[in-house]
Every structure is written in structure tokens, then in C-alpha cells.
Amino acid sequence: MPRVRDLLYRFRPAGGPGSATPAGVPADRARDLAEELEPVFTALAPTLAHCREVVEQGRRDADRARTRDALAVERLLADSSARAATARAHARAQELAEADSRGAVVEADAAAHASRLGVRLGELLPTYREQVVASVRALLAEAPGRDTGPGGRP
């Protein structure tokens, strides 16, 4: 009597086309793999659903974070613009104050120089006046046909 193993050996998977091999049932590798992995995929279905939920939650969190950060950036830009305007106004005021200070120094120097020129003019003017009057008298004295008035003055 044949053994059970020998009976089952006839139904062993056979290879694909090619060289001759012992007769057998053609192998359906895809079905065999699907049957083998079906319990694994069934067991992983809850994990896969949880992963999808985690990804969706991550997307929602990212959207909220983007919105929050965009608002923070807008506030930061507005605050920076306000501080920049204040800083520009402060710098402008400092520049004007420094320009006024430099202008006051220049004005004081000019006033001092004008005062010195006035003193010098006061010192030199009588001398120059006497020289001019003497020159005019000399010119008049040299002029022919000069009319002199009473007291010898023209």
C-alpha cells in the first residue's frame, strides 16, 4: 500500500515552463503569498487606520501652527515697522539737534569774527579816513582853476 506521503507528493507545486520535471499541480505563487499574508494584513488594519489618524492630526496641527506663525509674523512685522519709524524719527531728531548745535557753534564763531573785524575796523578806520581826506585834498590842490570858498575850503 502506498504511503500518504507518496500520495501527496503527486500534488506538490511544480515549476513553470522549462525543462521537464516530475508531474505535479502548477504552483500559484500569488495566491499562496496572498493566503500567507492575509492574516498579517488583517492584523495590521487597526494599526494602518491609527497611522492615517496620526497623519491627519499632524496635518491639522501643521495647519494651525502655520496660521499661528503667520499671525505672529504679521504682528512682528507691524511691531518692527513701528519701531523702525520711531527709530527713524529719533535719529532725525538727533541729527537736527546736532545740526542746530553745529549751527550755533558756527554762528558764535561768525559773531566773534565779526566782532573782531568791527574792532579792527574801528582801529583802522580813522587812519584810512585821514589818508583818504589827505589824498582828496592833494588832488584838489593840484587841480587847475580850483575854486575855493571862504576859509580856503572848496
Image: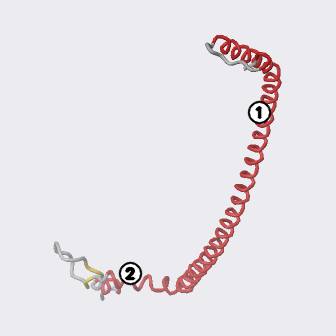
Q: How crowded is the residue under tag 2: few (<14 C-alpha within 10 Å), some, or many (20+)?
A: few
Residue 73, by quadrant, is bottom right
The quadrant of the rendering that contains the N terminus is: bottom left
The percent coordinates of residue 99 (x first, y second) are: 74, 43
Q: Relative to the observer, which residue lies in front, 55 or 32?
A: 55
The percent coordinates of residue 124 (x first, y second) are: 78, 18
Q: Which mark is residue 33?
A: 2
Residue located beneath label 1 in the image: 110
The percent coordinates of residue 78 (x first, y second) are: 67, 67
As drawn, is 110 to the left or to the right of 142?
Answer: right
Element type where label 2 sits in the image: helix
Mark before the other along the chain sequence, 2 or 1: 2
Residue ranking furthest to the left: 19
Residue 152, by quadrant, is top right
Residue type at numbered disc 1: Ala
User: Which mark is in front, 2 or 1?
Assistant: 1
Q: Against 25, is 89 above or below?
A: above
Residue 104, by quadrant, is top right
The quadrant of the rendering that contains the C terminus is: top right
Q: How crowded is the residue under tag 1: few (<14 C-alpha within 10 Å), some, or many (20+)?
A: few
The percent coordinates of residue 147 (x first, y second) are: 68, 19
Q: Against 85, is 61 above or below?
A: below
Which residue corresponds to the image point at 60% horizontal and 75% vertical from the top-left?
A: 62
Residue ranking furthest to the bottom: 1
Element type where label 1 sits in the image: helix
Marks 2 and 1, how far apart at CA:
105 Å
Residue type at numbered disc 2: Leu
Q: Against 125, is 26 above or below?
A: below
